[in-house]
Amino acid sequence: MKTAILAAALAAFGASASLAADKVTLQLKWVTQAQFAGYYVAADKGFYEEEGLEVEIKPGGPDIAPPQVIAGGGADVIVDWMPSALASREKGVPLVNIAQPFKSSGMMLTCLKETGVTSPEAFPGQTLGVWFYGNEYPFLSWMAHLGIPTEGGEDGVTVLKQGFNVDPLLQKQAACISTMTYNEYWQVIDAGITPEQLMTFKYEDQGVATLEDGLYVLEDNLSDPAFVEKMVKFVRASMKGWKYAEANPDEAAEIVLDNDASGAQTEKHQKRMMREIAKLTAGSNGALDPADYERTVETLLKGGSDPVITKTPEGAWTHAITDKAL
């Protein structure tokens, strides 16, 4: 009898273990930091486990393009900015936005006042640092809106291909550089430059903000009911992680630090970053706001002679996952 009970218990354990082995691979847009705190919190707090998921979180980096990773089968779902995702979709990688944890944009240009750049009208003739690898699209759209060429000259701007650091500003190689409200701006401050010495231009304030850090999958996978159910669980647990991170920023930052295998992040920077990130995820329950999507598409289509996308996308987002998850 005891043998039978033990066998039944082991069978039940095996069945529950198999249920918990529904694997999801998430590819991040950048390295382990508070920008992705919601996912690390969901894993640490057992929110994924509660949904019967085993989630692998793959950090990104300067040489990692999430659309290429998912196209090559290296991830089930990726974090990407919508300009990059829509550009990739137009080029043949059928990405679909299934959730949008970030409501607001954190992107901006940060300039030294001593260069004379105190308004966008002062951009012509200046050198501006710009991130590439898909991050250049919002900038190029903004310049197109302003009617400013990006090939240099007195009437245009010279684009400096900026590394993922703030050196061009510190070394005065550029009048302005690309920064995020939650990251590089504070690196400039930590380098000894005061806020009073800087002029910042937030994309949100300039009317050209585009959506950042959405969750994307390949369109064909959405025809698989099992995959859809897996994403419903993933999004539900992830948003639970994000809302926990918003409410507990310092704890969330500590969880991120615990997962930083590189050891490159500092407690001060990550806690500060998490507080800034919470401002960007505030107001989102995870479902994409169609008005935000339309604004992003409109911005990208108005890219002058070389727009980010050349036609209005079709089927580039869905509420099918968030309707069930939330």
Image (cartoon, grey):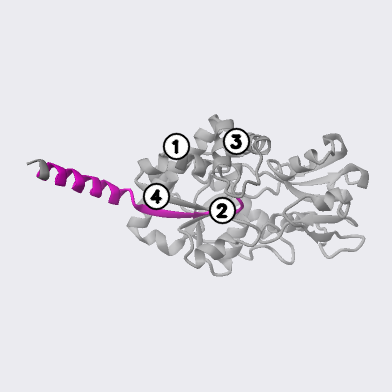
Measure the alpha-carbon separation of dots 4 and 2: 16 Å
Q: Mark 4 and mark 1: span between their CA atoms?
A: 13 Å
Q: Which residue is mark 3?
A: 278
Q: Amino acid at mark 3?
A: Ala
Instruction: Give the residue pinned by disc 2.
Output: 59
Amino acid of disc 1: Lys
Pinpoint residue 12: horizontal percent, then vertical percent: 20, 45
- Residue type of the residue flagged with mark 4: Glu
First in sequence: mark 4 vs mark 3 = 4
Left or right: residue 151 versus residue 40 is right
* Contact (Cβ within 8 Å) of mark 3 with mark 2: no
Estimate how packed mark 2 is, as few (under 14), some (14 to 19) or many (20 or more) residues with alpha carbons within 10 Å.
Answer: some
Question: What residue occupies the far front of the structure in this picture?
Answer: 3
Contact flag, marks 4 and 2 (Cβ < 8 Å)? no
| Residue hosting label 4 | 54
- At 60% from the left and 44% from the top, the residue drawn is 35
Circle 1 residues within 10 Å: few <14, some 14–19, many ≥20? some
Pick the front one: 213 or 292: 213
Q: Nearer the viewer, residue 83 or 110?
A: 110
Q: Are marks 4 and 1 in contact (CB under 8 Å)?
A: no
Kind of element beneath mark 4: strand
Residue that carries the numbered disc 1 in the rendered image: 45
Instruction: Assign the N terminus to one quadrant of the image.
Output: top left
Q: Secondary structure at mark 3?
A: helix
Quarter where residue 133 is shown: bottom right
Is 152 one of the magenta-colored residues?
no
Q: Is residue 240 left or right of residue 212?
A: left
Magenta stretch in the rendered image: 4-31
Going from N to C along the chain, the mark reached first, 4 or 2, is: 4
Disc 3 or 2, which lies upstream in sequence? Answer: 2
Can you give x and y, in whole percent of width and height, for residue 23 in the image? 39, 54
Residue drawn 54% across the image and 30% down it: 248
